[in-house]
Structure formats: C-alpha cells, structure tokens
Amino acid sequence: MSLIDSINGFKEENDAVIVAHNYQAGEIQDIADFVGDSFGLAKKVTGLDVKNVIFCGVEFMVESAVILNPDKNIIHPELKAGCPMAEMVDLDDLLEYKQKNPNTAVVSYVNTKAETKAESAICCTSSNAVKVVESVDEPKVLFVPDKNLGHYITRFVKDKEVDIWDGFCGTHDKITLDDVQQLVDKYPDAEIVVHPECRPEVVDMADYTESTAGILRRAHESDKNHMIIGTEKEMGHRLKKEVPDKEYHFPGNPTCQNMKKITLEKVLKSLENLEPIVTVDEELAHRAKKPLERMVRIGRGNE
Ligand code: SF4
C-alpha cells in the first residue's frame, strides 16, 4: 500500500481531518482536506464536526487552533516545527516594556506564542493589521513581533505613536530589492505582489502588498501572465493549482525550513497513533483567547 493510501485509510478509520498551511510542502498540501493561512485554518477547524485534527503548520498556529478549539484533539506531526519570529519575543522583555509603558496597547501579530498573546490587548493578522491598530483606543501602540509588518502599518496609521518590536521573519526578510529586480528584468510586464512581512524597500517596489489569501485573490483577478510573488515559495503550489494559467516567480526562492519539518511519514505516524496532541495550559489559553476574540470582533480576522 502506498504512503498516500495509508494516510487516507487511517484518516477515515480514525475520523480525522488534515489541515495544512500554504507554506507546507506541496505533497502535504495535496493530502490535506483544507489548505490556508494560520488563523484561517484555526477558524476552519472550529466549524468541523470532527474530533481529531492533524495540523500541518508551525507551533504558534497549532497553539491558536488549540486555544480556539478546546473540544478537539489538535495533533501536531512535528513538535519541533516552531517559528523563529515568534521566538523573538522574550516574555520578560515584553513584561518590562509593559511596566514602563502602562498606557500603551500591545498589538500582537497572530504569529506569536500563546504567552505573548496573553499579554496583548488585541491580535491581528497580516490582512487586518492596519484596521486593528486603528481600532484601539490608546494613542500609543506596541506592535510585536514583526518590524516589517510594523513599518507597513505606519504607512497608514498616522494618528498613533507606534513602537515596533525588533523581530522579523527570516524567510520574508531575506527577499532583497536585487532579487525582485532580477525578475523584473526578465518579466517586465509581471505584476508584483508581496507579503507585508517583506522589507519596506521591497514593499515600495510592489504593485500590491497582500496576505497569502490576498495574493491568491490577486492571482484570480490579475490579467497578467506572469506574477512576481514575494512570499514563501511553496505558495506557488497552491497558486498553480488554483490559477494554473499564469507563471509565478519567487524572488530569492525563500523557504521556511520549519514548515518543511513536517513530512508525509510524520503525518502518517500521527494519524496512526493520534498523537502528539498539543495542549495549552487552561489559564494561559483563557488569557490568550481574549485578544484573538477581540480581533474577530473587529472583523476580517480570517486571513
Ligand atoms: S514563514 Fe516566517 S513567520 Fe512563517 S513560520 Fe516561517 S519563519 Fe515563522
């Protein structure tokens, strides 16, 4: 029996659903029941009438799914798949900042650990970050952890003071102007769409700055044959599947190694044994859920 047949067999036998992030390897996306971005997947899980969910993504995404779905078994095929950017927020440093700046609202990107969310006033995604920062009452905001997304926010939010944490996503931050220019030279008519986790100068060069869901939407809407996409290269798998009539080019070919720690073999093992089930301390989950729920109330919290 092939690996794929075994995965499908155990999925049915154990009443499980597989969800995968857009940056998972193509073969993982292909066996998943749902593919999407982190918060979109966590919310998707909420609507599923199933007990066991194999979550193919990195730690902070799995944690969010656990926090929002305490009634389900959220299973992570590779516990060592973490996110270096989420690790860039040291809890003690954040607590010290809060103590020194008691009237500043902490806005955290969903790409953070539960302990960071628990200390935040509200969370945001890459698509609603501007709207969320605009929504808080406080005149001063601390945005954590991504400095590039933080700078992107300040392009639009002019009536608040925004302190920005010094974190970044190594996958997006490594995309340079030079990488983009090389592709522009080759495909001068291409539409350039980049993720707001990219450096400010790369954002300046783009026609559109979008979350992964927005990038997919642009692919559907654009009349260009070539698109230069500034995000993790595996997004190309989904783009090619859903909008096959275009060519997608990824400057610098950025790869998130943590996303690739999940393999078909590990998914099969998780399906077979229905473990490891991820848990989040109840009190921590309670505190981390509040800023997530507050974001959902603001709207567009699905990307
Ligand atoms: S792509 Fe960046 S933000 Fe996403 S998991 Fe990898 S390192 Fe973290």
Image: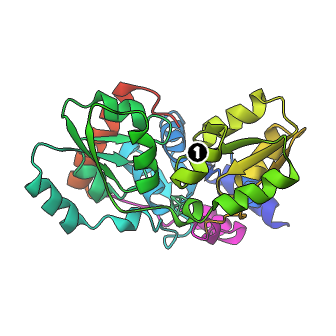
Q: In which quarter of the view is residue 107 placed?
A: top left
In the foreground, 149 or 183: 183
Could one spot residue 9 in this view of the protein? no
Q: Residues within 10 Å of mark 1 (few under 14, many from 20)?
A: some
Q: Is residue 147 above or below residue 159?
A: below
In the foreground, 137 or 110: 137
In the foreground, 199 or 25: 199
Q: Secondary structure at mark 1?
A: helix
Picture residue at 75% right of the left edge, 48% below the top: 228
Q: In which quarter of the view is residue 157 placed?
A: top left
Mark 1 vs ligand 1: CB under 8 Å? no
Residue 28: where, in percent of width, then height?
71, 58
Could one spot residue 113 in this view of the protein? yes
Looking at the image, residue 271 sits to the left or right of residue 109; the answer is: right
Does 265 lie within the magenta span?
yes
Does 215 lie within the magenta span?
no
Residue 208: where, in percent of width, then height?
64, 37
Residue 138: where, in percent of width, then height?
18, 34
Q: Amino acid at mark 1?
A: Asp
Residue 74: where, in percent of width, then height?
48, 54
Picture residue at 70% right of the left edge, 37% below the top: 216
Which residue has dot 1 on it? 204
Which portion, as a residue range, is magenta? Answer: 257-280
Picture residue at 38% right of the left edge, 42% below the top: 68
